[in-house]
């Protein structure tokens, strides 16, 4: 509770949960039912993630009387193309080969909705981080896919997991690549008058 209002994370991601705990030790998890496929991938990446994050947060904030709702969306972008979660092993293999030996961009959109007496106020923003993947042999790609880790991760890797060995360099916010840019989130909360570490 922050100033008598509950904090709600509109995501089931365990990584986002762990990062939000750095700011607020207790909060509710209410995954949004918003379908990201309803956001056009023709949008510029920064606009896409902010719009998706806002729609997730709004879906959960609807009907709340006094709450702080946090929504986020993370994508991997290479050659101007958005890479989502792989659909199968072959798709994971394709993504990892595409990222190998190159720098790509990770975008996370964050939307915070402060609801007081049923009236919402919003603050939103986007973080971008450059990530360089080491040169990857086919054998290393297959061994990594064999761990099962890439299958539910945007871009087919998890920087905070076994995929850490694939990452040569990070330029920008590390937490953004994990899925929740903590600094950006803290500034959005403060913009809405929220106290940190509540």
Image (spheres, rainbow, N blue to C red):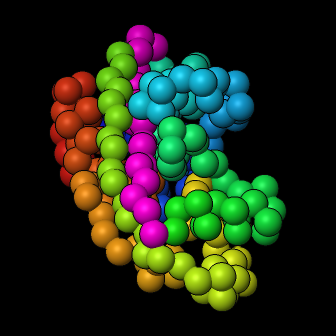
Residue 119 painted magenta: yes
- In the image, 185 versus 141, the foreground residue is 141
Q: Does residue 62 appear anywhere in the picture?
A: yes
Q: Residue at x 20, y 37 (%)?
A: 187
Q: How many marks?
A: 0
Q: Position of residue 137 (x, y in %)?
A: 59, 83
Residue range highlighted in magenta: 101-120
The image quarter containing residue 189 is top left
The image quarter containing residue 155 is bottom right
- In the image, 174 versus 167, the foreground residue is 167
Q: Residue at x 38, y 65 (%)?
A: 132
- On the rendered structure, is 164 left or right of 194? right
Q: Position of residue 11 (x, y in %)?
A: 56, 46
Q: Position of residue 43 (x, y in %)?
A: 54, 23
Indicate whether 157 appears above or below 124.
below
Indicate whether 151 appears above or below 134.
above
- In the image, 120 versus 39, the foreground residue is 39
Q: Main secondary structure of the magenta part?
A: strand
The quadrant in which the N terminus is found is: top left
Q: Residue at x 26, y 32 (%)?
A: 188
Residue 166 painted magenta: no
Q: Position of residue 65 (x, y in %)?
A: 48, 20
Q: Does residue 116 appear anywhere in the picture?
A: no
Residue that protrudes farthest toward the top in the picture: 119
């Amino acid at each position: 509770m922050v100033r008598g209002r509950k904090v709600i994370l509109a995501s089931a991601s365990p990584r986002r949960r762990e990062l939000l705990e750095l700011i607020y030790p207790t909060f509710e998890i209410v995954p949004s039912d918003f379908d990201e496929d309803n956001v056009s991938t023709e949008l510029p990446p920064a606009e896409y993630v902010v719009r998706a994050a806002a729609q997730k947060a709004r879906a959960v904030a609807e009907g709340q009387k006094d709450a702080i709702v946090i929504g986020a969306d993370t994508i991997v972008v290479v050659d101007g193309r958005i890479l989502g979660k792989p659909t199968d092993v072959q798709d994971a293999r394709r993504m990892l080969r595409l990222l190998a030996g190159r720098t790509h961009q990770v975008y996370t959109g964050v939307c915070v909705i402060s609801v007081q007496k049923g009236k919402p106020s919003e603050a939103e923003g986007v973080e971008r981080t450059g990530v360089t993947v080491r040169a990857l042999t086919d054998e290393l790609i297959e061994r990594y896919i064999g761990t099962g880790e890439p299958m539910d991760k945007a871009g087919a890797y998890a920087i905070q997991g076994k995929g850490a060995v694939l990452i040569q360099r990070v330029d920008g916010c590390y937490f953004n690549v994990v899925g929740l840019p903590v600094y950006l989130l803290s500034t959005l909360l403060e913009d809405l008058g929220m106290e940190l570490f509540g």
